[in-house]
Amino acid sequence: MRCRRFWVEMRSHFLERNKEGRATTVVTEKMFLKSKRATELIKITDEVQRVVERSKLKNGIINVFTLHVTTALTVNEDDPKLEEDIAQFLVKAVPEDDSYAHHHFFRKDGRMAVNAYSHIRASLLGPSLTIPLQGGQAVLGSRQHIYLVELDGPQTRGYVIQVMGE
């Protein structure tokens, strides 16, 4: 059985009219993917564009938000070597073997918190992106692509794509 890397769990559609009677539509989809490495950049540009196409909206904004504190989002060039460089930079900038206050035992559930470096790396990049929508397409530069950045994998990760406009 082949394992899917990307899938959709939730879809919602909301329509609201402003005072002038113009409709604003909000389409929200919760997406999931499976990361393969501890630190990796996963291109999600195509998934974002598919949500835009399903929304049938032409102009507005696209918001992408990660549902995890140890993942982040970024826009960069689609180059596997650059993806490796960015991942390696994050590992060097915030090393795993440093002494972090977050590394401790949670008495209430018996877990160890030993991933402070992942939280710090995610904080440096941020949990969301806003991208203009024009003519039914995400407005990105010719080399720009949207990435979910895994910082504590491999794991199943969720993110939300919300398209708002008319």
Image (spheres, grey):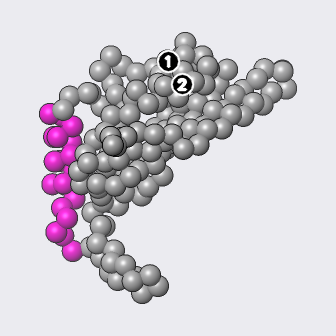
Residue 18, position in %: x, y? 80, 27
User: Which numbered circle lies on residue 32?
Assistant: none
The label number, if any, that marks residue 137 in the structure image: 1
Secondary element at image label 2: helix
The tag earlier along the polypeptide, 1 or 2, is: 2
Q: Nearer the viewer, residue 99 or 112?
A: 112
Left or right: where 28 falls relative to 31:
right
Residue 116 in percent (x, y) is at 31, 67
Q: Please, which residue is most extreme toward the top here?
A: 135
How many residues crowd around disc 1 within 10 Å: few (fewer than 14), some, or many (20 or more)? Answer: some
Quadrant of the rendered image containing residue 5: top left
Please tell me which residue lies in front, 73 or 94: 73
Q: Picture coordinates of residue 76 (x, y %)?
A: 30, 31
From the top left corner, tell me how far across and down residue 139 is, in percent: 45, 20
Magenta region: 81-99
Asked if residue 135 lies in the magenta stretch, the reply is no
Amino acid type at mark 1: Gln
Asked where in the image residue 135 lies, by quadrant, the reply is top right
Would residue 59 be visible to someone looking at this image? yes
Residue 115 position (above or below residue 51): below
- Vertical relation: 129 (above or below) 98: above
For the point 30% across and 58% down, which residue is it?
Answer: 152
Residue 81 occupies quadrant: top left
Identify the residue at horizontal 59%, vertical 43% (top origin): 10
Q: Are marks 1 and 2 in contact (CB under 8 Å)?
A: yes
**Residue receiving disc 2:** 52
Name, please, the residue furthest toward the bottom. Answer: 107
| Disc 1 element | strand
Q: Quadrant of the N terminus?
A: top left
Looking at the image, residue 82 lies above or below residue 59: below
Residue 124 visible? The answer is no
Front residue (pair 89, 147): 147
